Amino acid sequence: MELVTTPTENWLHQAVSNCRSSFLAVSPFVTGLFAEITADLPQEAERTLITRVELRQFALGGSRLESLVSVASQGMKVRSLAGLHAKIYLVDNNKALVTSANATRMGLTRNLECGVVVTELEMVSQLKELALSGFGQGENLSEWKLAELEALTTPVERISELLAQSSLANKAEIEQLILDTKDESQRQQLLSSFNGWMALTLEGCLLLKANEFSLDDLESLCLPLAEKRYPDNHHVRAKLRQQLQRLRDLGLVEFLGGGSYQRLVR
């Protein structure tokens, strides 16, 4: 059994340099160093990152949106899982590092981390299957395309501006910060920084009066808006369901189960 301690960066560099066919990383937080290291993956290698696409962490700097954009532009599939805490780095289906180290500069180089390398093929396969199933939460594991990640740039900038003007106590919850913003023009500017179907879905969530709502409730309210803005689209319900998952990833809507949702913004 091989133990990997700080700096985990050394192990990851070597794993990437030896990678031939596939690379899977599971980490809640990602920053630039990870993008730099994985840029050396062979072009033909299949690559996947499971992380948290969360506005609060992007705005606070715990994870970097630009790093996700960078790896996505390199051909890496970016998937989001709300509540993710596991960290796994798996190479060529024959070796995996299960570790405490996030895919951040601090996690890979400075924090005192420890991990174990798994080479037993059946165990590696189980780890990969577990990760790709969202650790048993498969329906909540969503894929973010490059264009969708790039579209988050303006919302993250707006939230960062709000955070810079808030007290430290308010930095814990983005949804509360949005709710408590007294400047209505500033609040609207933030909400209007979203676009497309995500903007329409968020607008519908904000128009609903109840603290909890169902997909049926949202569809009834959004259907007239969708018919006006997207008259050629006949799959409104599917679009709304997809965007609710996106908003859940971002920390703006919470799924309660049974097809019901709870607004975290109003």
Image (spheres, helix red, strand yellow):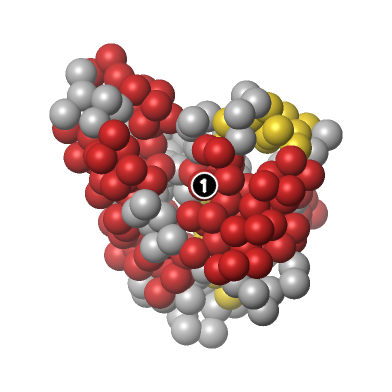
Q: Toward which corner of the image does residue 212 lie, by quadrant?
A: top right
- Residue 111 position within the rendered picture, expressed as x and y whole percent measured from the top left: 31, 33
- Residue at 67% of width from left, 79% of height from top? 232
Foreground pick, 168 / 180? 180
- Residue at 65% of width from left, 67% of height from top? 227
Q: Is residue 74 left or right of residue 236?
A: left
Foreground pick, 167 / 137? 167
Residue furthest to the right: 258
Is 51 rendered above or below residue 187?
below
Q: Secondary structure at mark 1?
A: helix
* Mark 1 burial class by Cα count in 10 Å: few <14, some 14-19, many 20+: some
Q: Which residue is mark 1?
A: 203
Residue furthest to the bottom: 44
Q: Toward which corner of the image does residue 12 lie, by quadrant?
A: bottom left
Residue 102 visible to the viewer = yes
- Residue at 37% of width from left, 52% of height from top? 192
Q: Is residue 11 left or right of residue 110?
A: right
Is 197 rendered above or below residue 54?
below
